[in-house]
Image: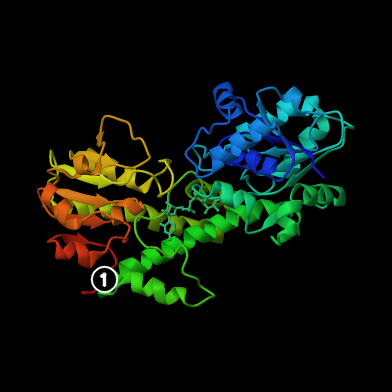
Amino acid sequence: MPLNVAVIGTNYLGAAHAAGMAEFGHRVIGVDVDPGRVAVLASGHSTIFEEGLEPLLAKHTASGRLRFTTDYREIADWADVHFLCVGTPQSESGAADLSQVWSVVESLGPLLTRPTLIAGKSTVPVGTAPLLQQRLDRLAPGAGVEVMWNPEFLREAFAVSDTLSPDRIVLGTRSAQALETMREVYAIPISDGVPVVECDIATAELIKVAANAFLATKISFINAMAQMCQAAGGDVTLLADALGHDTRIGREFLNAGLGFGGGCLPKDIRALAARAGELRVDVLADFIASVEAINEGQRAEVAELAIAQLGGDIAGRKVAVLGAAFKPGTDDTRNSPALTVADHLAAAGADVWIYDPEAQVSGPSFTQAETVEDCLRDAELVLHLTEWPLFRQLDPADCAGLVRNRVLIDGRLKLDRARWQAAGWKVVQMGRAATL
Ligand code: UDX
């Protein structure tokens, strides 16, 4: 049965969730404090580059099932479920900044007069939901507002497919009524066989950050092994392939290279470490600190390698950087490993040119090239830092004709080394010291 669903916060998570809820047959209103974003979404367009999102927004804004507003009064007593999808960015201390979550509660709470469910999707420190419940009990006394947690796991570039076919649905509540409502919300994926984990609120809050911490750990582990392979003369990609055949380990998230970035993984594990510190779970805080240190080290290492390839003096030398987004398939450059390396090289005086098929880079330190050819022309060093498929399709011989030096640092270990070497390139891949 279709429900009235409000989605509060309509950036990556909220826009995909609102469109997904409409696709599941519900009547949906997305709310955001940014009138510009609301206007774009209301016209059926997306404010972000995300595969499949715009067609879904267009479909459901046209059908009338999906609307957007800046006005909380339109959703307060209308919605059966209010999904909380606002951002929880990193604060200066490393802990999560919950100001947007609190601001929603302060705006929405006084308007609620009938029983409703507030389902948190934002990534928050464990222990947040009970505080929100207490505050809402004060702001809407007697209304019957229930807070539960339903974390999201969507990946950028796969936001729509992860929303429509999630790996699992986590329902963190002890209320039978809340569970029943959420099972209606997700009736379609549940009938498709998506597993549901019912648990208490604290576990639900923790599941999301634990998943991200585990993924980050896999990446840092393989990057530490890459250093071992480099030191001992091994090949980390073959090592990862062999590990991946063990189904207990799995091959995913074992790609060595520049490490993880983006708007989620780095901030979420830092927030988990901060919360672990507050709760005196030092083993976890220390563990995450190691994972982060390995990750930061990879960026520094690639930058140093680049400088060393140019004999230690990079000032005024043209360097071509292929890729700016934090991963392929997105235009997002938040905490992008590629840009950290580019920044480092620019700070050392290099003339840094960047090409990315989607991401825009700004700032005085770089030149954004319009084409790969412009980026490569006369470069003394080429760095492959975001593994867009089009970079794998480049012809090494054509590229050789453009550059001044045929030196390539493949920071993502995704280029075909033998092909590039055959065209006369020196190819540097950290963790692949084994000779062919
Ligand atoms: C991540 C989680 O995957 C998702 O479940 C969560 O909801 C949000 O955070 P996302 O930020 O979109 O999603 O990025 P993801 O695909 O996980 O990649 C994160 C980073 O790790 C990227 O910079 C990527 O390049 C890097 N990475 C990934 C590696 O360095 N090696 C790998 O093997 C995999």
312 sits left or right of 95 in the view: left
Let me know if residue 348 appears in the view: no
Residue 422 x/y as whole percent: 15, 65
425 sits left or right of 62 in the view: left
Q: Quadrant of the C terminus?
A: bottom left
Please tell me which residue is depicted at 21% across the width and 55% down the height of the picture.
395
Q: Quadrant of residue 354?
A: top left
78 sits left or right of 290 in the view: right
Q: Amino acid at mark 1?
A: Ala
Residue 189 x/y as whole percent: 70, 55
Q: Quadrant of the N terminus?
A: top right
Please tell me which residue is depicted at 58% across the width and 21% down the height of the picture.
35
Residue ID for mark 1: 231
Let me know if residue 431 appears in the view: yes
Please tell me which residue is depicted at 33% across the width and 56% down the height of the picture.
298
Instruction: Please say if 426 is above or below 386.
Output: below
